[in-house]
Image (cartoon, rainbow, N blue to C red):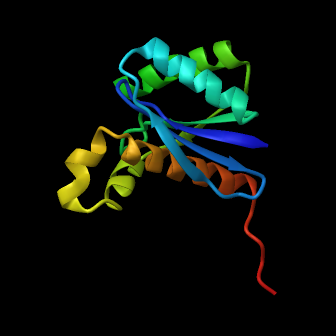
């Protein structure tokens, strides 16, 4: 299993990779201005890294309901399935961007935001949640 974690955004798409070892690693985010360029780069990454599963953050509201952003992610998930013919796993992304942003010094957050670093760290958290559910940790002896 080679998974690509995705934190979807209309301007930036955070990415992370993980496999059967159960460790998610952030990748550079897709920050291309044109959506077609982001899709082309995503295709390249999926092919080069021989991705078998896509893990997409799903934006539930704090009360567990789904809102407008979830409908955008549903459309994106549908396009992922159609474009790449890979399984797409939806994972609750509640507070992942907040947690990822908290790892950046406050004075640096504004300048770092456009780089996609926070988005890829959020994708890493999303993917790690998925991997932790699929690959239980070893029991210490």
Q: In which quarter of the image is the N terminus?
A: top right
Location of residue 135 in the rendering, given as x and y in whole percent from the top left corner: 75, 57
Location of residue 6 in the rendering, given as x and y in whole percent from the top left corner: 53, 36
Residue 68's place in the image compared with 96, above or below, is above
- Which residue occupies the extreme left position in the image? 107
Residue 31's place in the image compared with 81, above or below, is below
Q: Is residue 55 left or right of residue 20?
A: left
State the residue in front, 48 or 96.
48
Residue 122's place in the image compared with 139, above or below, is above
- Which residue occupies the extreme bottom position in the image? 141
Q: Residue at x 29, y 43 (%)?
A: 113
Q: Residue at x 48, y 12 (%)?
A: 36
Q: Residue at x 42, y 50 (%)?
A: 96
Q: Which residue is drawn at 46% across and 44% down?
A: 120
Location of residue 3 in the rendering, given as x and y in whole percent from the top left corner: 69, 41
Residue 48: quadrant of the picture: top right
Residue 56: quadrant of the picture: top right
Q: Is residue 129 left or right of residue 10?
A: right
């Amino acid at each position: 299993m080679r998974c690509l974690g995705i934190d979807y955004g209309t301007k930036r798409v955070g990415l992370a990779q993980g496999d059967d070892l159960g460790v998610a690693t952030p990748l550079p985010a897709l920050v291309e201005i044109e959506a077609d360029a982001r899709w082309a780069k995503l295709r390249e990454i999926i092919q080069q890294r021989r991705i078998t599963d896509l893990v997409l953050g799903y934006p539930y509201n704090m009360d567990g309901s789904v809102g407008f952003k979830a409908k955008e992610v549903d459309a994106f998930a549908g396009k992922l399935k159609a474009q790449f013919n890979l399984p797409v796993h939806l994972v609750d992304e509640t507070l992942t961007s907040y947690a990822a942003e908290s790892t950046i010094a406050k004075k640096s957050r504004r300048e770092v935001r456009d780089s996609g670093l926070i988005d890829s760290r959020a994708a890493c958290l999303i993917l790690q949640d998925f991997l932790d559910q699929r690959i239980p940790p070893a029991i210490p002896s």
